[in-house]
Amino acid sequence: QKEVEQDPGPLSVPEGAIVSLNCTYSNSAFQYFMWYRQYSRKGPELLMYTYSSGNKEDGRFTAQVDKSSKYISLFIRDSQPSDSATYLCAMSLNSGNTPLVFGKGTRLSVIA
Amino acid sequence: GAVVSQHPSWVICKSGTSVKIECRSLDFQATTMFWYRQFPKQSLMLMATSNEGSKATYEQGVEKDKFLINHASLTLSTLTVTSAHPEDSSFYICSARDSRGDEKLFFGSGTQLSVL
């Protein structure tokens, strides 16, 4: 079993739809959870950063962490064509210099 | 968020030449930087962890003599692909954490390397 599982998609939705992206993980020691957005041939951009279970909202984006189920989600409301990108979940242990563990990324296309 | 500058953005070189990629943290200090490579439609693959003032830690299967990493200051790490071959063609991305901050990792814009 891989440490972080993420459905690669592709996921295609109409403009305005609510998008749900998910990751599961196996290591209960993960403490920090992040979502990155990556456009083609660009470096990943940090979208959301959370610590502990619960919800965090930032504009049209909501990150959700359920540590008991080892499950994290990213919701995008009122999706736009500019949201079309690959979304990567990432997580980290509680240690400053350890690298992040990434999911494979989900390719999202928002159709106008 | 913090800014990580990476250049060049793309490079085309002949087989057998060496290529240097620079990664700078512009508005913060980073004792640790990470180097990744990414093949088309694949996720990020960690190559090595670069520590300021000490030797880099390489992931299994990554040749340290081929991918030379230097982290001479708190704001600069370089990756040199020595004697590049076509199979080294890939998208290379660096990342860094603010030494005084939290677990957030910020990425450079990436370098597309094409070896002919």
Image (cartoon, coloured by chain):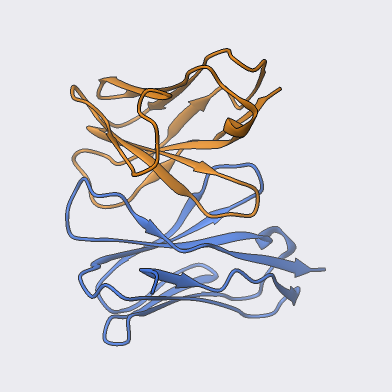
Work out whether residue B22 can be spotted.
yes
Instruction: Give the farthest residue toward the bottom.
Output: A69
Residue B27 percent across, percent down from the top left = 34, 30
Q: Is residue B64 left or right of residue A17?
A: left
Which residue is painted at 33% across and 54% down in the image? A100
Q: Is residue B51 above or below residue A12?
A: above
Rendering coords of residue B32 (x, y %): 26, 35
On the image, the x and y values in percent for residue A9 come to 64, 71
Quarter of the image holding residue A42? top right
- Which chain can be seen in blue? A
The foreground one among B108 and B44 is B44
Question: Image point 49% across, 37% down: which residue?
Answer: B93
**In the shown orientation, is residue A49 left or right of residue B40?**
left
Residue B1 seen by the camera = no
Task: In this rendered view, identify the residue nearer to me: B86 or A106.
Answer: B86
The quadrant where residue A16 appears: bottom right
Give the side of residue B21 with respect to residue B31, left or right: right
Q: Quadrant of the C terminus of chain B?
A: top right
Residue A63 as seen in the image, left or right of residue A37: left
Where residue B115 appears, x then y in whole percent?
Answer: 66, 24
Quadrant in which the N terminus of chain B is drawn: top left
Of residues B26 and B8, which is closer to you in this image? Answer: B8
Toward which corner of the image does residue A69 lie, by quadrant?
bottom left
Q: Residue at 27% of width from left, 39% of height from top?
A: B98
Q: Colour of chain B?
A: orange
Front residue (pair A15, B95): B95
* B74 w.r.t. B104: above or below: above
Q: Residue at x 74, y 63 (%)?
A: A81
In the depicted structure, whether residue A111 falls above or below residue B50: below
